Image (tube, rainbow, N blue to C red):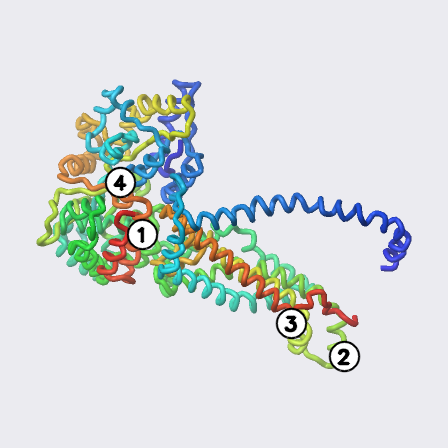
């Protein structure tokens, strides 16, 4: 099995695998860890070469679809039917991105990770301002923080999917969930929606107003520099996945423990059609079983899926690191956690969202996703106009 | 010399008998090299050529695509951007690296002890892997947590890797930093091969150090310069690891050179067909450049520069 490196999840998974190994000494699982961005490339190459690990970790959606259509991953539909207890253990919404053409190809696991707007409470108190509720608030905060000599927003722009989160939320707030739904379904000219152009325009206005920290386009999210900028007080706000809460708690020198980390939902846009309760992010992470694995390996993997991957110990570990596992009936556990404010916020956001949009780069096919990330990079650099962005993306529909 | 000549004369009759056998034996000796060449160079090359006419996402089945990949890549402005950047980096790198490594090579060829000590320092970057170099530079140049802020030198805190022109310049600088030591080594060897008698004769004729450099060192280094330039120019087509780690082709597409473009198309966007088209283009450019540089050396390759010595 391959998994992503980085704490606190690496320890959690290693413990789960070790526990599974000691109770199943004949069917141990070996884990190798990779950095996020490197993993995404490596797993594709390995699957193409028929050298995939037995358990294929991923984010579901468009990438899983290419695997499923090439018969590289096992169809788990009947297995889930045979194990209804397991299926009912998870949030129902988490199965959406695991399903391709009506069949389930992956086990949802880990946690739900909406993208939220984090802010540094200390800096907000110093400036005497409130976190933004509307886009107009955002633009006025940008001016206030720049005058204070603090960057308004931290952003790991070289990773590109970080910039994408801004577009995901903005497009949803401006045009509603239907705009991306049409894009996802490959409807003709879906990217040419006026909401896309308005989203691009708003982003470029924010860039022009120095909304993002100096050098954002050379900062990577893998190095967690974007988080460090927030907790060291160099930037006031950060739009990131809820999974950054754990690392910030661990590495932020009591920034989180002292209650200096604030979090709110993404602001609304005046005249926008989107429901302000809508969320974007990862509905879950996913694990599939390679079709190339031997029967014995497949059995071990299924046993691990059933008994080893979301045990009570693992669930507690996720909650302790500030994440909301995707299992039903955890309200009680969340309420007693020292991180209950954040956990309840994430839980409510995920549960109450009328539409929870999966990250675009995971939902779309790898070909369209790469074009998307490349164009987003150029949009943030202002080397293309919003109109060109829409046209370039429109050419990728159906690819 | 004299001992080998007598040895040769003595064994001459036996040699004639053996020539036939030796020739076939020599041919057999090339087999391992030939196998490696076919398996690791020719076969992939043919594979890439075939793939450039195919549809493949790297995971599923391979299907025929005809000329579709070629027409889509050749009409893509991204290709010309990548080509332009590749040649720009190649030319500027050559212009920057050649004089520096030539001068450093001449300097370190001296036998003074302090020069030997300095040479060791100059060669240090050669020991580091490209990825390590890139990660180190990335950390040093970080505008918020990097060297400039650490030392309190705000004028150094430019957004080195975030502004297209700066990023391109920086890439060229880091490439030079990494590869100048290697070429210095080549020039050092070249300079040490030049017979002392040439310099002694020049000194007697009253030529100063600068005249000696331009009239003896440079002409004598002709083939060294060609070798080093070939390595530099053809090597610059394959710069990948350093740029990939340093900028990932960004910001935007401002450092997305051909080799990187090929990788991103193939392994990120799952478009193995178009990526193969770019691979074929890279091979052709590399071959043409290598041949051209060899021609620069003149047709008479066997000619000696030490004639009359």
Instruction: Give the Cα distance between marks 3 and 2.
Output: 19 Å
Mark 2 element type: helix
Instruction: Give the Cα distance between marks 2 and 1.
Output: 68 Å
For label 1, the residue is: A371
For label 2, the residue is: B204
For label 4, the residue is: A245
- How many residues crowd around disc 1 within 10 Å: few (fewer than 14), some, or many (20 or more)? some
Mark 3 element type: helix
Residue B220 appears in the rendering: yes
**Label 3 with label 2: CB-CB less than 8 Å:** no
Q: How many marks?
A: 4
Q: Earlier in the sequence, mark 4 or mark 1?
A: 4
**Mark 3 or mark 4, whichever is nearer to me:** 3
| Figure check: A306 above or below A8 | above
Determine the chain carrying the residue at label 2: B
* Closer to us: A384 or A324: A384
Q: Which mark is residue B218?
A: 3
| Figure check: B279 above or below A312 | below
Query: Do marks 3 and 1 share a subunit?
Result: no
| Figure check: A102 above or below B81 | above
């Amino acid at each position: 099995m391959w998994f992503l490196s980085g704490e606190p999840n690496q320890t959690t998974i290693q413990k789960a695998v070790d526990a599974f190994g000691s109770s199943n000494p004949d069917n141990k699982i070996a884990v190798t860890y990779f950095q996020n961005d490197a993993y995404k490339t490596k797993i594709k190459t390995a699957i193409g070469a028929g050298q995939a690990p037995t358990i294929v970790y991923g984010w579901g959606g468009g990438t899983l679809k290419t695997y499923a259509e090439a018969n590289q991953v096992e169809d788990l539909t009947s297995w889930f039917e045979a194990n209804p207890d397991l299926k009912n253990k998870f949030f129902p919404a988490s199965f959406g991105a695991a399903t391709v053409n009506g069949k389930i190809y992956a086990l949802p696991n880990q946690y739900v990770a909406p993208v939220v707007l984090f802010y540094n409470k200390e800096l907000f108190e110093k400036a005497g301002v409130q976190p933004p509720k509307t886009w107009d608030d955002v633009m006025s905060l940008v001016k206030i923080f720049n005058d204070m000599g603090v960057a308004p927003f931290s952003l790991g722009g070289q990773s590109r999917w970080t910039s994408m989160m801004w577009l995901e939320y903005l497009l949803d707030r401006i045009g509603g969930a239907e705009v991306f739904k049409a894009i996802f379904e490959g409807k003709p000219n879906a990217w040419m929606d006026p909401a896309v152009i308005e989203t691009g325009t708003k982003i470029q206005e924010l860039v022009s107003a120095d909304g993002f920290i100096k050098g954002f386009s050379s900062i990577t999210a893998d190095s967690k520099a974007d988080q460090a900028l927030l907790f060291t007080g160099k930037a006031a706000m950060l739009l990131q996945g809820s999974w950054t809460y754990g690392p910030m708690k661990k590495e932020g020198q009591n920034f989180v423990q002292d209650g200096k980390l604030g979090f709110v939902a993404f602001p609304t846009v005046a005249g926008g059609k989107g429901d302000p309760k809508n969320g974007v992010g990862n509905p879950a992470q996913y694990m599939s079983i390679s079709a190339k694995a031997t029967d014995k390996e497949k059995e071990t993997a299924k046993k691990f899926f059933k008994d080893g991957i979301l045990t009570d110990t693992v669930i507690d570990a996720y909650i302790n690191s500030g994440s909301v596992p995707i299992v039903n009936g955890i309200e009680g556990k969340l309420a007693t956690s020292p991180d209950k404010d954040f956990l309840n916020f994430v839980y409510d956001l995920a549960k109450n969202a009328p539409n929870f949009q999966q990250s675009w780069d995971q939902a779309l096919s790898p070909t369209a996703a790469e074009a998307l990330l490349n164009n987003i990079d150029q949009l943030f650099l202002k080397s293309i106009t919003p109109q060109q962005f829409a046209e370039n993306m429109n050419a990728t529909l159906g690819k | 010399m004299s001992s080998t000549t007598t040895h040769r004369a003595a064994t001459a009759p036996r040699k004639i008998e053996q020539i036939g056998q030796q020739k076939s034996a020599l041919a057999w000796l090339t087999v391992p090299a030939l196998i490696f060449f076919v398996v690791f160079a020719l076969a992939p090359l043919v594979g890439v050529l075939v793939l450039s006419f195919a549809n493949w996402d790297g995971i599923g089945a391979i299907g025929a695509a005809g000329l579709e990949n070629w027409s889509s890549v050749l009409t893509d402005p991204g290709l010309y951007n990548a080509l332009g950047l590749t040649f720009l980096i190649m030319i500027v790198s050559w212009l920057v690296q050649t004089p520096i490594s030539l001068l450093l090579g001449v300097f370190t060829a001296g036998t003074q002890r302090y020069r030997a000590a300095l040479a060791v320092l100059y060669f240090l970057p050669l020991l580091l892997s490209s990825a390590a170099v890139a990660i180190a530079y990335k950390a040093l140049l970080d505008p918020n947590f990097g060297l400039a802020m650490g030392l309190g030198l705000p004028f150094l805190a430019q957004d080195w890797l975030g502004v297209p022109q700066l990023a391109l310049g920086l890439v060229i600088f880091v490439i030079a930093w990494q590869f100048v030591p290697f070429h210095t080594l080549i020039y050092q060897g070249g300079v040490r091969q030049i017979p002392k008698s040439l310099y002694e004769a020049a000194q007697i004729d009253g030529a100063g150090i600068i005249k000696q450099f331009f009239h003896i060192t440079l002409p004598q280094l002709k083939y060294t310069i060609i070798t080093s330039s070939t390595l530099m120019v053809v090597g610059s087509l394959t710069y990948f690891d350093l740029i990939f780690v340093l900028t990932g082709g960004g910001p935007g597409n401002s450092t997305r050179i051909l080799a990187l473009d090929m990788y991103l198309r193939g392994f990120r966007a799952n478009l193995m067909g178009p990526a193969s088209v770019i691979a074929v283009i890279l091979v052709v450019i590399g071959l043409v450049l290598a041949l051209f540089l060899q021609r620069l050396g003149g047709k008479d390759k066997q000619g000696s520069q030490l004639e009359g010595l």
